[in-house]
Image (cartoon, helix red, strand yellow):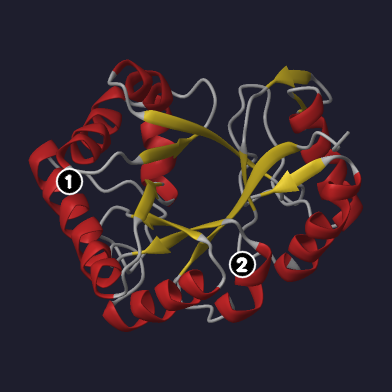
Amino acid sequence: MEKQYKIVDINADVGEGLNNEPNLMPYLSSCNIACGGHAGNLETMTKVVRLAKKHSVKVGAHPSFPDKANFGRIVVDMIAADLYSSLKAQIRALQDVLYAESVQLHHIKPHGALYNLANRDEKAAKVIIEVIKSIALPLALYAPYRSVIAELATKAKINVIYEAFADRNYNNDLSLVSRKKDNAILSHTNEVLKHVLKMINQRKVISINGVEVEIKASTFCVHGDTKNALQILKYLNEELPKKGIKIQ
């Protein structure tokens, strides 16, 4: 009898100016492409889309607050209509590239401060949901378990794929430990594997305070700017199948 595998997705945020996509892409099953808000332009989007196509990697849009100066990492005070227009324009820019390359848009994953804000703020979450609903494609949303945006999107009949972070530590409330703290990032490969396996097999994560917290995820993000991101991705690709977990 054929072995039954659990299926997970491994994603990374790409097209953000690091130019490490040729190395990362063979080890990903989906990617989130910066589309002009915090990073990215026609040239970078085209390059990354072609790489994704070559490696059969699912493509998502990675829109953000329109704030290249701060790399989308701070909340920009915008009225809902302006945020909607900006996000729509960013996604459309990527869609134009995808159309030219005959690649389908698979999902949306907000970036940085917008991602974090939509996890807790109904107004920001609703804008993103309205943008997704306005696109004539059945798009998925990558969002964290128990986030405001995941709950609202589920009610709006959007396919929510719960996301967790392979290389980041969590607080008790499932928020990520601030990058300003020394223990925010997990960089040892065996530590990352242990962290991911617990989330997959037990639906639990050990918070920074040692508390076991319930979590659900079927896509796991490895940040492209984590210093040994390539090493982490290679290790997960080698080790997860040995544990009965297939990346696809």
Residue under the image location 59 percent in, 79 percent down: 20
Report the residue that reaches farthest toward the front: 1
- On screen, residue 87 versus residue 194, left or right, reads left
Question: Looking at the figure, which quarter contains the N terminus?
Answer: top right
For label 2, the SS is loop
The answer for how far apart the CA atoms under marks 1 and 2 are is: 26 Å
For label 1, the SS is helix
Picture layout, residue 243 above or below residue 21: above
Picture layout, residue 134 above or below residue 111: above
- On screen, residue 12 versus residue 246, left or right, reads left
Amino acid type of disc 1? Leu
- On screen, residue 175 versus residue 115, left or right, reads right
Residue under the image location 85 percent in, 38 percent down: 2
Q: Residue 225 bears which disc, if any?
A: 2
Query: Would you say the residues marked 1 and 2 are in contact, meaning their CB atoms lie under 8 Å apart?
Result: no
Would residue 52 be visible to someone looking at this image? yes
Q: Residue 83 bears which disc, if any?
A: 1
Would residue 227 be visible to someone looking at this image? no
Residue under the image location 85 percent in, 59 percent down: 238
Amino acid type of disc 2? Asp
- On screen, residue 246 versus residue 87, left or right, reads right
Percent position of residue 199, x then y:
75, 31
Mark 1 or 2, nearer chain start: 1
In this view, the residue in front, 153 or 123, is 153
Q: Residues within 10 Å of mark 1 (few under 14, many from 20)?
A: many
Picture layout, residue 222 above or below residue 152: below
Q: Residues within 10 Å of mark 2 (few under 14, many from 20)?
A: some
Percent position of residue 37, x then y:
28, 62
